[in-house]
Image (cartoon, rainbow, N blue to C red):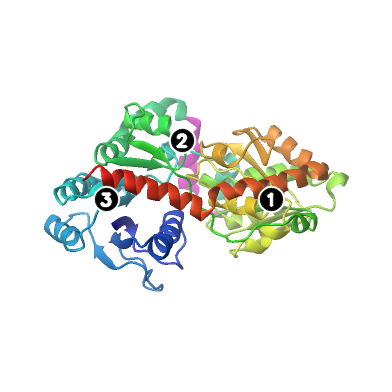
Amino acid sequence: MNLLTINSFDCSAQSSGGVNQTTVILTRYFTHQCGINCYLGFFENNLPQFEPLPEFKGRILLNCRFEEKAFEAFLRTNQIDIVQVNFLKKHNLKTIPQIYKIAHQCGAKVIYAFHMCPGFQSVTYGSWERVKYGWLHHDNAIEETKKWILTQTKWFWGGLARRILQPKYRVPLDSCDKLVVLSKYYFDTYAYFADTKPNNKMTAIGNALRFNEYASKQDIEKKEKTILVVARFDEYIKRVSLQLRAWKQICDDSQFADWKFQIVGDGRDKDFYKYLVRKWNLPRVEFTGRQDPKEYYRKASLFLMTSTAEGWGMVLTEAQQMGVPIIAMDSYGALHDIIENGVNGRIVPNDDLKAFQAAIKELMLNDGLRQKMAITSVKLSKRFEIEKILQKWLQLFNETFKTSK
């Protein structure tokens, strides 16, 4: 079988980003374990400092003008059976009907993989705390004020956003043979934004684990009293300020004096988060910068997430396989594929800071429950082992490929 994957960017093992990393993992397994010939199409070359992934047998640079003859020649020359289009940037979406038309002319089938949470474009979060900081420190003040206003007025413009976004969801759905989303909980949401109903084109395949190791019971017993956050410092999406605010209500309690709060990551809002730590006089908060998080997972006892939306949240499954129970706000559907509430973590209502704080305190105080959840986290994380995710993709390829014969 010959597979052409189309991404917005070229692909490298050294590059970050969920779509890139997922492409790397699957391409390596397709090539080395399954004997699939893999090719790559991309719209922008963003890898001057990195080596392109060598597993691809060929590449084609596309552009928004989309040269149909060159694309057709590539498909025919390499006898492509399946074209998998990963979520594209908005200015490239208009090429999907052309990709679909030419692929069918060449006897290939098209799979569209949507790697985000449907409707993520309409999710807003602007905090008054960030607005004040922006004006006081001349840091994106106007932009942060706009975000706050959008958040406060979403009741007014939310319906309009759905109508504006509709083509971004309907066009790919109409121009593919199969649509892959990350969770079955996204079927209804995707259909809502596409202004249609869920149909048999839709299937769900989550992301695979990145690590090849799991925490043992002995590893879990050695864990430190550390609450861990691994995130890009982007308040609009990650809302790390909510986690710091939760810590503010917890850290002065003498019962938790031996706990610390560790934040792994970097980004544009780093100075804002450090400002909050100083303003609120928060003790035992450590900023590590951007690091490989594996060693931090090994030591941590709890993991927090408050994102406004995620497609999957690979840091969650990474934390789980290293035996770290998760406490997360219920802001996106795939969370329920990853966390079984009360079994391997806690899911609290979105924006409910009191419930979030209560869940954190509960697991900080209950060593037995926390360790039980940690052991279960490791066990349940194996649902997302690469071999199991790979089999789902292979089954989809085979079913889709057979319909073209």
Q: Which of marks 1 and 3 is nearer the N terminus?
A: 3
Contact between marks 3 and 2 (CB within 8 A): the answer is: no
The residue type indicated by label 1 comes to: Val
Q: What element carries label 3?
A: helix
Q: Return the residue nearer the eye: 137 or 24.
A: 24
Relative side of 126 to 39, left or right: right
| Residue 324: mark | 1
| In this view, 343 is above or below 296 | above
Residue at image location 24% in from the left, 63% down from the top = 61
Residue at image location 61% in from the left, 37% down from the top = 329
Q: Give the alpha-carbon distance from disc 1 to disc 2, as whole Å.
A: 25 Å
Q: In which quarter of the image is residue 174?
A: top left
Mark 3: few/some/many CA within 10 Å (<14, 14-19, 20+): some
Relative side of 401 to 306, left or right: left
| Residue 92: mark | 3
In the image, residue 187 lies in the stretch drawn in magenta:
no
| In this view, 360 is above or below 22 | above
In the image, residue 144 lies in the stretch drawn in magenta:
yes
- The residue carrying mark 2 is 184
| In this view, 153 is above or below 179 | above
x then y, percent, for residue 199: 34, 30
Range covered by the magenta-colored residues = 137-153
The residue type indicated by label 3 comes to: Asn
